Image: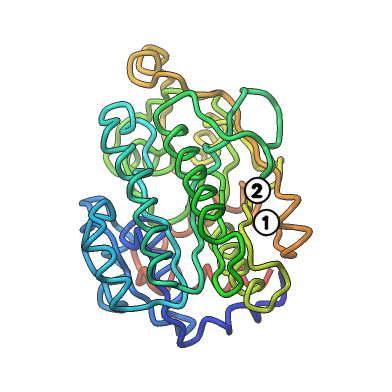
Amino acid sequence: MKNNSFLKSYKNLRVLITGSTGFKGAWLSFWLNEIGAKVIGVALKPEKNSVLFKSLKVDEKIQQYYLDITNFNKLNEIIKKKRPDIIFHLAAQSIVSNSFKDPLNNFKTNILGSANVLESFRINKIPNLVYITSDKCYLNLDKKKNYKETDILGGIDNYSSSKASAEIIFSSYFNSYFIKEKNLSLVSARAGNVVGGGDMKDNRIVPDIIKSLINKKRLILRNPKATRPWQHVLEPLSGYLMLVQNIHEKKIKKMKQNWNFAPNISSCKSVLYLSKYLSKYLKLDIIINKNQSKKIFKPETSILRLSNYKSRKFLNWHPKWPINKSLDKIIEWNQKIKITKVSDICYQQIAEYLKN
C-alpha cells in the first residue's frame, strides 16, 4: 500500500458520509476534504464528547446536515438533492453498553437506519455504496478463530445481533435488486475495534483511560481479559478508500462483496494489556471491578479475531501500525493537542501513515 495513488481518484468527487459527527466519520470527513473531495455529512448533532468533530471544525469544511437516518424522508431528500458519487455509511449506535440500556434505539438505528440508506441508494441509483458494519456481526463462538467474510453471521447480544441483522439486510437488498446490476456497486466493510486520537466516547476503553487521566481518577476495568482486534482508525479508513478505487478501476468485480479490514493477530490484545501500556506513559492507577462487569454488561464474549487475508490478496491492503504503534500515536495526539492545532496533528499522522 506504499502506492497511495488511490487517493487521487477522490478529487472533486461528491462523497456523502453518514455518521460524520462520530469518531470515524470525523477522521474520514477531514481526510477526504484534505484530498479534494466534496464532502457531504449526514448525522445527528455532535454530542458533548464529540471532541474531534468540533476541534477539527468539520462543519466549516464540508456540507453538514443534521438529521436522524431513521427518518427516511429527510435522509432521502438530502441524497436525492446532492446525488453523491459515493456513500460511506458509518452512522450507527456504536456503544455495546447502550444496546442493553436502550435496545429499541439500538435496533432502530443499526437496522432501520441502515435499511433506509440502502433504500435511498437504490431508488436514487447512486453509483457506489460502502456499507460499514462491525466485526461483531459474526456468530462469535468465543474461540481462537479468525473470522473470515464467509463465516456465519449472528449475535448473542443486542449489539452484535443488530450488526448481523444490518448485514443480512445488505445481502437481501443485493439479491433482490442488484444481482444483475452493472452500473452500481455496493460493498460491506467490517473493521476491528478502532482506536485513535480524538475519541472521547463513553464506555470505550481508550477514551475511558484518557478521561480518567484528565479527571485524576482511577481507571475501573469491567472486562480486563476481553481480547479484541485493536487497530488505529486510519487502518480501516484507508481500506474503505482503496475499496472504491479498486472498483472504479475494475480490479475487483462490481458486485456484492464483504470485506474485513482487520489488524494482524499480534495486535489482538486484552483490555488489560492496553490499559497497562498506556498507564506507563499516562501514570494511571488501574482497578479491576468484577462486580461491575457482572452487574452491567450481560453476554460479552471474551475473544474476537478477524481474518484480513481477502483484503491483503485482492486489494493489496495490509495493516501498517501494530497495536503498540497505534497506542503511541494516541499518546502523541494527546500530548500535542496542548500546543498544536488538532487539524495539524491529524494531518501529520495521516501523512506519516501514508509514508509507511
Q: Is residue 325 left or right of residue 102?
A: right
Q: Which residue is mark 1?
A: 319
Q: Residue furthest bottom?
A: 12
Q: Position of residue 284 (x, y in %)?
A: 42, 35
105 vs 120, nearest the viewer: 120
Q: Determine if residue 19 is in view.
A: yes
Label 2 with label 1: CB-CB less than 8 Å: yes
Q: Quadrant of the C terminus?
A: bottom right
204 vs 44, nearest the viewer: 44
Spatial separation of the CA atoms under disc 2 and disc 1: 6 Å
Q: Is residue 109 above or below residue 337?
A: above
What residue is rendered at 72% in x and 64% in y? 315
What residue is rendered at 75% in x and 58% in y? 312
Q: Quadrant of the N terminus?
A: bottom right
Residue type for callout 2: Pro
Q: Say which label, 2 or 1, has the lower sequence index.
A: 2
Q: Which residue is mark 2?
A: 263
Q: Is residue 298 above or below residue 319?
A: above
Q: Is residue 143 above or below residue 60?
A: above
